[in-house]
Image (cartoon, helix red, strand yellow):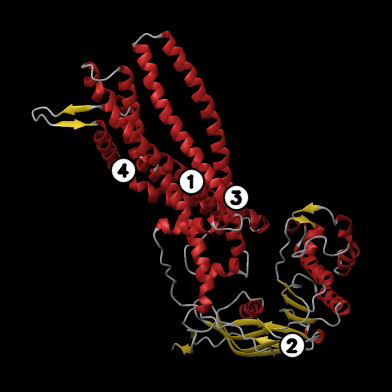
Amino acid sequence: MTDAKPDPAPAASPGPVTVTRKRFLRQVLRLAGPYWNCERRAKVRSATLLLFLLTMGQVGLSVWGNYWQKGLFDALEQRSVRGVLLQIAVFALILAISVAVTAGHLIVKRWLQIDWRAWLTEQLVGNWLAEGRHYRLMFSAGEHDNPDQRIAEDIHIATESAIAMGHTLVYSLMTLGLFINILWSVSGAIIVPGTGVQVPGFMVPLAFVYAALGSALGWMLGRPLVRATNDLQTAEATFRFGLSRARENTEAIALMHGEPLERAGSSSRFVRIVREYDRQSLAFMGLVSFGTGYGALLPVFPLLVAAPQYIHGAMSLGALMQAAQAFQRLTSALSWPVDNIGEIARCRASADRVLSLYEDMQQLDAAPQASYGPRIAVARSDRARLEIEDLCIAEPSGRILLEHFNLDIRRGERVLITGDSVVTGSLFKVIGGLWPWGSGRVWLPNDGGMLFVAHRPFLPEGTLREVLCYPHPPDAFPTSAIRHALECAGLSWLVSRMEEQANWEQELLQRAQQRLSLARVFLQRPAWVFLEGATDAFDPKGERLILEMLYRELPNASLLNISFHPNLGQLHHRTLVLSQVDEAKMLFDGRRTISIH
């Protein structure tokens, strides 16, 4: 046996695992940082720089437009036809450049949004669908319900909103810096009545006060929106998951006439959506009501404040309009938080759902290196045999199913395993590397391939050729080999449908599906075959015939067959009967076995 030994893994903790959440901004940076430094970072950084330059162009055009407005109203006040015509020409130029800059900005921004989404989706899907994490995650503590929805929908929302808000924030900061200077210079100074104190650029501090009051009231009214949005998105994901689950199990539901219960479950989940939607509507109501009044007052307020300066001749009509627009630009920039509170809530809720899935997968991977005891270690040996040493299988809760189990299967040996279905099913998953809870060591053979055939075969949508070759590409095997495999499995009538694309789980009955999964064995010809109830849909004669065919086609293959059908022992070299540990409630804490009386 090789000297390389698998690292010990910890036992499942009986209690829930608490994941410490860092601050939201740091969490977002943990997702954005790797993207910024990914393998295509040259394109990402170039696009980000280009987006920044185009944003600078947009701000520059708004400043130019502000000065253009002053020139136009001054020309109108002077009744200068030449001046008005000149301003019309300038406006045409500003408009043409604005259209080009806006179009370019849109393309670059959307490219960044879809590229970040594609990269993040690839990373999470790659982690989720690797090393059985998608299976093990179901048994781990944490907030990772509906991972498919988190990957499909929440990544979309988080990446799109984050980039859009990042752009508007940068735009607002640059606008703030430029329009403070403009407003300071055009608003002039006023004398505080009764004091003789002159206040220069008086509209600048006034804009800060106006925006500060508006932001404070907006945040106070909008705080409930964050929680309401998060709860609503969770309810929506749960509703979609329920519908998807019903679609996947449509045959079983129809046979059991379970439609009324499914409708009731769907209705109760939708009632939760309505309840959370109403909560969000109430949160929106206060914010929108305030925002309407705040926005309606904004264009009028600076005109009223600066009107005395114009009336007393201290400011031209053009300067008055320039000051009013600069005031609006400045307060809009200062009001970015309150203007974006709804989008912040939406982005934060989705980002938190993505990050919780990301962190829980990290926690899942970190568990084997934790300090609270070993888990089942699975590794490859350099010998042509399967060896299991002092195996203890436990449930995620810690309850022991099997202990002190040893097994040695030589190459070419056929072993039947029967007994308690919970224990045998767990053993099948242990050998497949899906069940880490417990202790002991499993040495997998290092010669030839291994193929696991479960009770319910997975038949991906696609052509029959793709189904049979799975998980290999469809061109991995010649057509003649596929035809021979179908004939060996008793499915010669499907040869003519080899290139047909269909939902084979719906097309074929359970027995035909199991025959199709065994046809994969005949086609892929592994050295080690592990079956778990893979022939339980067969009648006794058909089951015997398919196993005899398997032995003829793969005479040197090893077989571990988990089955509960009688009279199969004579087709195997030996039979093992497994049963659960005595119901004295044995718990496993990773270091020792504890009896609870």
Residue type beneath disc 3:
Lys
* Residue occupying image coordinates x 46% and y 48%: 273
Foreground mark, 1 or 4, reads 1
Q: Is residue 263 visible?
A: no
Foreground mark, 3 or 2, reads 3
Q: Residues within 10 Å of mark 4 (few under 14, many from 20)?
A: many
Q: Residues within 10 Å of mark 3 (few under 14, many from 20)?
A: some
Observer-nearest of 364 and 180: 180
Whole-percent x, y for residue 277 in the image: 43, 44
Residue type beneath disc 1:
Ser
Q: Which residue is mark 2?
A: 383
Whole-percent x, y for residue 119 in the image: 59, 55
Q: Residues within 10 Å of mark 1 (few under 14, many from 20)?
A: many
Observer-nearest of 332 and 470: 332
Q: Are marks 4 and 3 in contact (CB under 8 Å)?
A: no
Question: Seen in the image, is 11 located left or right of residue 556?
Answer: left
Question: Seen in the image, is 198 located left or right of residue 140?
Answer: left
Whole-percent x, y for residue 407 in the image: 68, 89
- Secondary structure of the residue carrying tag 3 is helix
- Secondary structure of the residue carrying tag 4 is helix
Q: Which residue is mark 1?
A: 161
Q: Give the mark nearest the N terminus, 2 or 1.
A: 1
Question: What distance separates the C-alpha of mark 4 from that of mark 3?
Answer: 41 Å
**Marker disc for residue 221:** 4
Q: Is residue 484 visible?
A: yes
| Location of the C terminus (image quadrant) | bottom left
**Residue reaching furthest to the left:** 194
Q: Which residue is mark 3?
A: 43
Question: Seen in the image, is 256 located left or right of residue 524?
Answer: left
Q: Residues within 10 Å of mark 2 (few under 14, many from 20)?
A: some
